[in-house]
Amino acid sequence: MMSPDTVWLELAGLRAVVTGGGGGIGRAAALKLLDAGVETIVLDQHAHAYAQTVHDAARLGFAPETVVCDVADSTDVKNAARAIGPVDLLVNTAGIVGEGDLLNVDAGEWATMLSVNLSGSFHTAQAFAPGMIARGGGAMVHIASIAATHPRAHSSAYSASKAGLKLMSQQLAFELGPSGIRSNTISPGMVRTPRTETNYLAPDLIERRHAAVPLGRVARPCDIADVVLFTLSPRARYITGADIVVDGGLTQTLMSHITESGG
Ligand SMILES: NC(=O)c1ccc[n+]([C@@H]2O[C@H](COP(=O)([O-])OP(=O)(O)OC[C@H]3O[C@@H](n4cnc5c(N)ncnc54)[C@H](O)[C@@H]3O)[C@@H](O)[C@H]2O)c1
């Protein structure tokens, strides 16, 4: 049963696949899509990864289709796309994080990061675009990060992978626009998800992070998922190739780091 609040999005009746649909942001996006009347397929690397999403969906009265697939493996993605069939909407949230400066990140870790965060979205876009073209159009959203635009300590491979993802999305927008397919990235700032929860075990960290954000708090997954739905919806029909920053204003604080005279 879809929520009346979502009618304005005009997403009801469409088909979507959400990669990383078992994760914090992916789960929130999948549940909101189901709530908007979208037939939603939850894709993740392991069945145990999406168990919570299936559980939460059942509590809302939904039974989403699920698919186990490693997005880093192009053959696996092609097989999954064949099994799923054509979709109108693709949400790429599958991603991994890793620590390391450029001078000491291991070449294998670098390759793994790019294979999931960048090639993973390439594989799914390539696999699902033909179905969208056959259906007369579609929309893709890929979750990047403010780390794609702003270097961060110990985040070398992750930042590079997300920067590549942003440009790949722009390229998709350029190539697929004439087929009626839009492609955009969303760049979250700090989001409290099960994956990042261990970060917040450090004393006072959550308070310090809340204080660093002009809007006064770290994001919740639903803050990102709402923007995913809008960006996918026909309400965003003239937005493509964009990167939508959803960071509570965090990236607007650069000038506050300048020490003033007397300060
Ligand atoms: N949480 C944040 O603060 C934050 C900030 C900016 C960007 N992001 C991005 O948002 C996305 C989701 O983040 P999250 O915090 O919800 O993470 P998460 O770890 O909770 O979710 C990621 C999901 O992707 C799945 N996944 C990982 N590798 C995969 C693979 N090879 N194939 C298929 N599925 C795979 C995982 O099983 C997991 O369910 C990621 O791309 C992340 O980089 C998160």
Image (cartoon, rainbow, N blue to C red):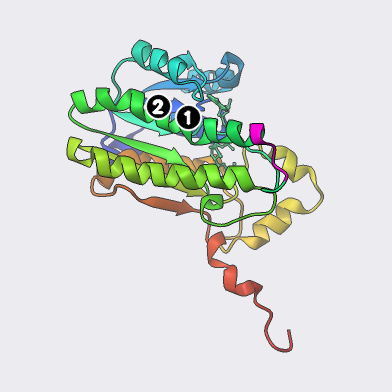
Question: Which mark identifies residue 124?
Answer: 2
On the image, the x and y values in percent for residue 41 come to 41, 20
Image quadrant of ligand 1? top right
Q: Secondary structure at mark 2?
A: helix
On the image, the x and y values in percent for residue 190 come to 60, 49
Q: Give the tally of numbered discs.
A: 2
Depicted 107 relative to depicted 167: above or below? above
Report the side of 64 relative to 180 (left or right): right
Depicted 207 relative to depicted 199: above or below? below
Question: Which mark identifies residue 128?
Answer: none
C-alpha span from label 2 to label 1 = 6 Å
Report the side of 238 relative to 219 (left or right): left
Viewer-side residue, 169 vs 234: 169
On the image, the x and y values in percent for residue 136 come to 17, 29
Question: Which mark identifies residue 120?
Answer: 1
Give the magenta part as a residue range.
Answer: 104-108
Three-letter residue code for mark 1: Gly
| Residue 150 in view here | yes
Q: Quadrant of the N terminus?
A: top left
Q: Residue at the location (73% across, 43% down)?
A: 199
Per the picture, the main secondary structure of the magenta-coloured stretch is loop
Q: Are marks 2 and 1 in contact (CB under 8 Å)?
A: yes
